[in-house]
Image (cartoon, helix red, strand yellow):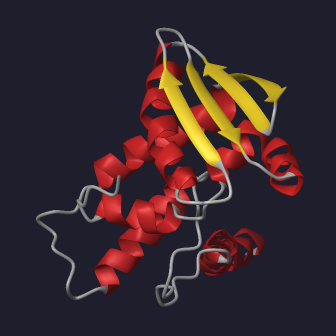
């Protein structure tokens, strides 16, 4: 009799234990309405892709024949390689800095795609002058200004801060995902 009661209790409790485990697993997985704008600027490729997918799916005007999430993923991989694996030497020069960035073949390829494209975004800021050179084994970014405050800002930002500045990344990611050529 004791075995029968124990087996019955266990059989009745099993679905509740499974529900409790699933409830714990899904606690952080709420799926609300898509945000009006993107909030994921780069790192966290899956989060950025997920956010873009939600936005595209909520837009009735999305042209699915042009959507290029593989292209966005490739760009996010480039961003990750630049941010985490590039080796950068920075020198203070009159009015700013020169940064030489390099890495293995994948990192160097990412630098060659990312730095010239982002230099165009940086150049849109009239407070500084931007130059970029892609060489055989590295990429050189030079940013200078005529005033001391902007020079201090350039040096404070350094290579990685400059690459992250000019907050165009969310719009850029959405344009890539939509199959547009943003640079």
Residue 36 at what x, y percent from top left? 48, 88
Q: Residue furthest front?
A: 146
Q: Residue furthest left?
A: 65
The front one of 151 and 163 is 151
20 displayed left or right of 167: right
The residue at the point 47 percent across, 70 percent down is 51
- Using the image, determine if residue 147 lies above or below residue 91: below
The residue at the point 16 percent across, 69 percent down is 64
Residue 128 at what x, y percent from top left? 67, 51
Residue 35 at what x, y percent from top left? 51, 85
Looking at the rendered image, the quarter that the N terminus falls into is: bottom right
The residue at the point 47 percent across, 30 percent down is 110
Q: Residue furthest top?
A: 136
The front one of 117 and 84 is 117
Residue 96 at what x, y percent from top left? 78, 38
The front one of 119 and 174 is 119
89 displayed left or right of 105: right
Image quarter of residue 25: bottom right
The residue at the point 30 percent across, 48 percent down is 70
Report the label total.
0
The front one of 172 and 92 is 92
Image quarter of residue 50: bottom left
Image quarter of residue 23: bottom right
């Amino acid at each position: 009799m004791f075995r029968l009661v124990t087996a019955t209790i266990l059989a009745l409790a099993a679905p509740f234990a499974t529900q409790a485990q699933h409830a714990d697993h899904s606690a952080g997985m709420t799926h609300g309405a898509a945000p009006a704008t993107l909030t994921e600027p780069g790192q966290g490729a899956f989060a950025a892709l997920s956010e873009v997918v939600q936005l595209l799916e909520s837009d009735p005007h999305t042209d699915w024949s042009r959507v290029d999430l593989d292209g966005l993923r490739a760009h996010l991989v480039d961003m990750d390689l630049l941010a985490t694996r590039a080796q950068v030497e920075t020198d203070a020069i009159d009015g700013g800095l020169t940064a030489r960035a390099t890495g293995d073949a994948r990192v160097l390829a990412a630098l060659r795609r990312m730095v010239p494209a982002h230099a165009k975004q940086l150049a849109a800021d009239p407070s500084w002058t931007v130059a970029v050179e892609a060489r055989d084994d590295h990429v050189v970014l030079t940013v200078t200004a005529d005033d001391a405050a902007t020079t201090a800002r350039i040096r404070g930002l350094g290579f990685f801060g400059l690459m992250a500045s000019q907050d165009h990344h969310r719009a850029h990611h959405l344009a890539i995902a939509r199959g547009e050529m943003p640079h």
